[in-house]
């Protein structure tokens, strides 16, 4: 089969579209023929050796896949050939076929497309965990979302509304702010003059919960714009700059800075993760959340797609297709 192979850690353009051994159905392994593969910001960090995890090389990157079961191991229960499944793991998804432990897969309702299923796992899963478990977002609170047109940002806007918050979406261009607005943001702002704009938008009260996948200057503004007892959620550093926290502000405003690592959450708290996914799927079926799929591209174009994602040139979710795609 064909897969995207990282021969060693290095620049993204060195990724290889090449032959790779097919997964074997043994034990608890479910083999999925990929229909859709999700692209995520951490995938690009991983292949460059910049992520928290550094797997042995060579390896196939990719965390999300949705498709049909083509084989099952002899210890697999509850899944059979022909089932539509989605799977999330740390590696291996950028391939025509993916082997996954049965604990990491879930059956898909007919109403959910393979593309949307991929988005619901990592992007929506991260935002949901951030706002529910880490941020403890409450009905009536104000949520500020940086990077509000990206995959996790759109998810945070929609989930925030589903949880009853007033949502302020922040994005860098008019086009991106329009995406945030269409996702349900009550107020949309740019980064220029953001501190004053947040003060005005919150009536001087400050932000209750802030969702920050960007870091850099945006984090610096949020650290000065939090309300009393607020929660500033650290999702990632898409800007490329890891900020420093002026801890005196957390003292005088009594707010918390809270780390969000969804991948570890899925491993350490599997029952809570399963309940989250059940709630997300329910919201999807009820029309409360709906992923924005920016484009679908051939698997062989993974390197160029990843470079655009890391350059913050993408809006919404990007999907790879083993059998090709259209922009």
Image (tube, rainbow, N blue to C red):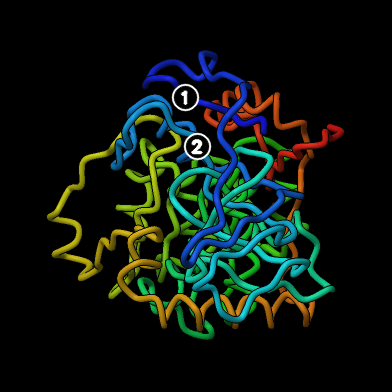
Q: Is residue 17 left or right of residue 325?
A: left
Residue 157: image location, x then y, percent: 61, 63
**Quadrant in which the C terminus is drawn:** top right
Residue identifier under label 1:
6
Residue 295: image location, x then y, percent: 78, 39
Residue 198: image location, x then y, percent: 48, 56
The foreground one among 239 and 326 is 326
Above or below: residue 89 compared with residue 283: above
Quarter holding residue 311 = top right
| Disc nearer the start of the sequence (2/1) | 1
Residue at image coords 40%, 67%: 266
Residue identifier under label 2:
61
The foreground one among 281 and 108 is 108
Residue 133: image location, x then y, percent: 38, 76
Q: Residues within 10 Å of mark 1 (few under 14, many from 20)?
A: many
Asked whether the beta carbons under mark 2 and mark 1 sit within 8 Å of each other, the answer is yes
């Amino acid at each position: 089969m064909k897969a995207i192979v990282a021969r060693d850690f290095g620049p993204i353009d060195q990724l290889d579209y090449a032959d790779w051994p097919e997964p074997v159905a043994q034990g608890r392994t479910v083999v999925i023929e990929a229909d859709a593969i999700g692209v995520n910001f951490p995938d690009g960090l991983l292949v460059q050796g910049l992520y928290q995890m550094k797997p042995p090389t060579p390896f196939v990157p990719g965390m999300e896949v949705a498709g049909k079961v083509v084989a099952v191991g002899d210890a697999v229960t509850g899944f059979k050939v022909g089932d539509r499944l989605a799977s999330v793991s740390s590696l291996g998804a950028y391939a025509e076929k993916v082997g996954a432990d049965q604990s990491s897969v879930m059956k898909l309702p007919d109403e959910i497309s393979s593309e949307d299923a991929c988005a619901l796992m990592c992007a929506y899963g991260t935002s949901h965990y951030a706002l529910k478990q880490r941020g403890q977002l409450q009905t009536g609170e104000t949520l500020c979302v940086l990077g509000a047109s990206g995959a996790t940002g759109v998810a945070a806007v929609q989930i925030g509304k589903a949880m009853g918050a007033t949502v302020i979406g922040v994005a860098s261009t008019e086009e991106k702010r329009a995406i945030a607005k269409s996702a349900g943001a009550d107020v949309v702002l740019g980064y220029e003059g953001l501190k004053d704009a947040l003060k005005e938008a919150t009536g001087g009260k400050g932000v209750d919960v802030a969702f920050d996948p960007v870091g850099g200057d945006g984090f610096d503004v949020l650290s000065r714009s939090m309300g009393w007892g607020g929660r500033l959620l650290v999702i990632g550093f898409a800007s490329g700059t890891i900020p420093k926290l002026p801890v005196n502000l957390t003292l005088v405003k009594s707010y918390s800075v809270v780390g969000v690592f969804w991948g570890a959450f899925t491993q350490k708290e599997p029952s809570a993760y399963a309940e989250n996914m059940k709630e997300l799927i329910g919201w999807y079926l009820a029309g409360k959340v709906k992923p924005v799929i920016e484009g679908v591209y051939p698997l062989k174009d993974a390197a160029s797609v990843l470079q655009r994602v890391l350059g913050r040139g993408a809006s919404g979710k990007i999907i790879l297709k083993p059998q090709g795609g259209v922009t």
